[in-house]
Amino acid sequence: MAVQALDTARLPVDWAKLVQKLALPTALFVVAYGVVPAYASGYLVEAILLPFLALSLAAVGLNLLTGYCGQLSLGSSAFMAVGAFGAYNFNLRVEGLPLAVTMILAGISAAGFGVVFGLPSLRLRGFYLAVSTLAAQFFVQWALTKFGWFSNDNPSGVVSAPHLAVAGLSLDSATGRYLLSVTTVILITVLVSRLVNSATGRNFIAVRDNETAARVIGVPVLKTKLLAFALSSFIIGVAGVLWAFTYLRTVEPAGFNLDRSFQILFIIIIGGLASIRGAFLGAAFIVVFPLFLSRLGAFVFGGLFDSGVLDMSQRIVLGALIIIFLIAEPNGLSALFDRLKRRIGSRSS
Amino acid sequence: MSYYDFLFVIEVLVGGLLSGVMYSLVAIGFVLIYKTSGVLNFAQGSMVLFAALTFVSLVERRVPFALSLLITFAVMVALGFTIERTVLRPLVNRSPMTLFMATLGLSYIIEGAAQLIWGTQVHGLDLGIDDTPFEVGGVLISSFDLLAAAIAAAMVAGLSAFFYWTRIGLAFRAVADDQFAALAVGLRLPRIWGTVWTAAGFVALVAGLLWGARLGVQFSLSLIVLKALPVLVLGGFDSILGAIVGGLIIGASEKLAEVYLGPFVGGGIEGWFAYALALVVLLVRPSGLFGQKTVERV
């Protein structure tokens, strides 16, 4: 009798709650696969959505390492470069390798690289580690420019991305590249959001919050850190593939410089550390904001200022925004978004 | 090894040591701020650029040398206190990482502002030091580098004297030792931080003049921050002595590596060699050569 009562108590589905829970993912899904491919203009896809998706993915990767595991890295774009050049070379040198396999292999090479440069984290803390990740940045850029093999001995060092196809279907059009990008990003994001709520994710957070305490309660600190480096680099490497293959359509070392690493770091600061949604909000902001600012500059001042002045003002505004966010909203756009939602929620109820 | 080979090694070594002093010059600015506030100030490089650019633009506008120096110093003082007021004070008691990221943002602002105000073209800077190399026992030494080293030595001596024999220097050391204790005995942290940033601004000015005279005053001047970081890591973030010794080690080994190791890997290794070297040292001594050991507590 008691069992039956329990069952009937559990049986009625809370439809309202279920709908509420599924509404946002469904809406995003419909927009990503229905509305955007059908209605978005070429400009929107090429200039905004493709860089947004690649940077979001890179930010998700860095967030795993910095936001969740607390290891500051200034070498993200090195791992992007390893991913991009890895994918280029796997594609070039292995006949008929499927695109998905190429991307996974590229991610794995980036992960291997990440583990090597993550090894110092076993000894180093904080800034000492951050500076040592710069070594990755400079070394990778040097190696890729120095050894022609990586760019197939192309004299300029700039190589164009290969033809993209999945199961015989060409993805070279803007929409095709978008679909490839969005699918990769969704897949990895779903996996990451599962991961951060698992035991591994909690280990990451434990190491971030207090390494010594984590060790005392039995978290395998070394393994956790290296895992964070490997996973983060894998994701950033795949993001590098997307950046080079779907957005730029060229692979070149110069695109993966220190400024790119900082850009990704800025994304997770502005978006919110240790928040997956933050990575997307931050990336959207970083991509759209300069476009908006230059439009605004052109609209308000006309052709009064040259592009140099505009460029400098953009730098200043970006720097100021970083500081303002750190002071006023340390949890980033993600927290801002939550507060907004609560306010709207409390008003309607 | 023949006598001339030996002389060549010595020459490379001396050249390296002297350029290492130039790295130390930048690194000292970092150490000052790190010691007293625990902030790794990434904006130090852009402060170097800002100081040099302000100075050179004033000189180009026919302001006398000494007056330009004075005005630039005043600007750096204002900058130091403004940074304290607008960036550090609101971020007090936040994690070192947060403060570091704030200085990243700060470096964007200062770089942007410097070039917005003074333009982006390259300025030549002539300090009136002639750069004819002279010979000591068959080894050529750049007189400019030697003078730079002398200036750096004088500055370190001055800073050390300031730290040890003045009241405010004592306050600096108290704050570096324990912020809360310093607050408890009534030291005014905001004012001390402002002063420390001013001191770092002064170091940036000196570094900016010397580096600017060598490379020309332009945007790439702010990139010397990337040269100073391995020096800091090697020497330890909180030791002026470490910054000097680290600079010497990095400068010398970088030049030697470029000459003797570079040809085997295709050259151009100065971009990362210093970092690799610093990493190796860190693996043995995780707080650098002279850095303060951290005690771990739960």
Image: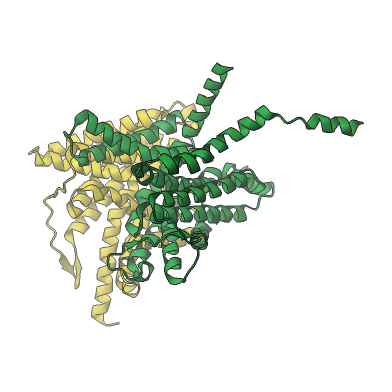
Side of A216 where B172 appears, left or right: left
In-front residue for pair A80/A135: A80
* Residue A24 visible to an observer of this rendering: yes
* Residue B98 visible to an observer of this rendering: no
Q: Residue pushed farthest bottom?
A: B2
Residue at image coords 69%, 46%: A217
Q: Residue pushed farthest right?
A: A1
In-front residue for pair A298/A16: A16
Q: Colour of chain A?
A: green
Residue at image coords 43%, 48%: A178
Residue at image coords 39%, 29%: B190
In-front residue for pair A1/A272: A1
Q: Quadrant of residue A49?
A: top left
* Percent position of residue A145, x then y: 33, 64
Q: Is residue A180 above or below residue B276?
A: above
Q: Is residue A146 above or below residue B148?
A: below
* Percent position of residue A103, x then y: 49, 59
The chain displayed yellow equals B
Q: In which quadrant is the N terminus of chain A drawn?
A: top right
How many numbered marks, from 0 up?
0
Q: In which quadrant is the C terminus of chain A drawn?
A: top right
Q: Quadrant of residue A328?
A: top left
* Percent position of residue A346, x then y: 57, 18
Q: Which color mode does the image show? A: by chain
